[in-house]
Amino acid sequence: MQLIDPIIARTLVPSPAMASAGAPAAHAPAPAAAADEPAAGDLPRRPVRGWTPTDVTAWESVRRSSVLGTLDAARGVREEHPGQALSDAQRAVLGGFLSREYGLPEETVARDLERVRMYVGGPGGGGGFGGIALGHEIYLANEQTLERILSWQGRRFLAHELGHVMQWRASRDGEEPGDDLRRTRRFLGNYVAGFVVDDRWRPGAVPRGMTRWVAARLPGTERDRRPLMREIHGAHHMEVRAEQVAQRFRAGTMPQRPATDAARGALEVTPGTNPQRQEQGQGRSAGAAG
Ligand SMILES: [Zn+2]
């Protein structure tokens, strides 16, 4: 559902699995295609022209602030304003990547990315949370956060929130068109349940998780919020997954320095240990990709 994405970068404590998952991606073989034009299975290694949409508009959500806005979403309260869409470049670059990462058909992902709309306030308002994704709607705390998520520098943030859109799509229930609301309710149920029962919904999980969530957002609890957020970001299976994928996207879109990487590899690798190192690296990489 949501993340304090400005905070996640500072508070997320990578698990050993995350650390090992990130390392191979950062030193992946150089793509053969030109850096500017993403090819199939490839990511651009430099800022993409037209990444940020032109005329970014901070549409105010009509849903209520913070958790009440999330409840509005679960009740089916609809947005009245058009919302800010993704750019063609963002959809083109992220579509294939998210499809592969989340195991969803490319056409489905492309259709979902076309429908993504961003708002400020609403469920994303109330302080603390940088971004919240509910179905196709992504809520940002304010206009500055909106501008950041749409910038090239904010692409990890964007990939993270779009990961929640993919998780929403993958939520059970609502297999037919028009079942978006049921899917949102299931997504929220899965998310809130993840607070208290790791990865499975159980009776009682929603009220328990909701109570903790609301308690962490009460006025005056700013100082106490960090430990809970760290716990969520480090332990909530949906957040961990969304962040792992987002980190891989950032790593895959970082400029490459072949000479530096080659020099580092030459220093690290000693004769006799190289094959084993390679096997381990490949194993971790394959595990992370799955
Ligand atoms: Zn998140």
Image (cartoon, rainbow, N blue to C red):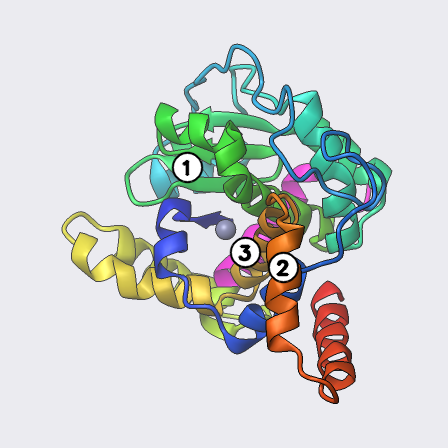
Q: What residue is shown with label 3?
A: 243
Residue that label 1 marks: 123
Q: Is residue 1 above or below residue 266?
A: above
Q: Is residue 236 magenta?
A: no
Q: Using the numbered discs, state the Cα–Cα distance from disc 3 to disc 2 in whole angstroms.
A: 25 Å
Residue at 62% over, 49% down: 257
Identified by mark 3, the residue type is Glu
Residue type at mark 1: give it. Answer: Pro
Of pointers 3 and 2, the one earlier in the residue sequence: 3
The mark lying in front, picked from 3 and 2, is 2
Whole-percent x, y for residue 114 in the image: 71, 26
Q: Is residue 174 visible?
A: no
Q: Is residue 131 above or below residue 3?
A: above
Mark-to-mark CA distance, 1 and 3: 20 Å
Q: Position of residue 58 (x, y in %)?
A: 43, 18
Q: Which residue is mark 2?
A: 261
Q: Residue at x 74, y 64 (%)?
A: 289
Q: CA distance from mark 2 to mark 1?
A: 43 Å
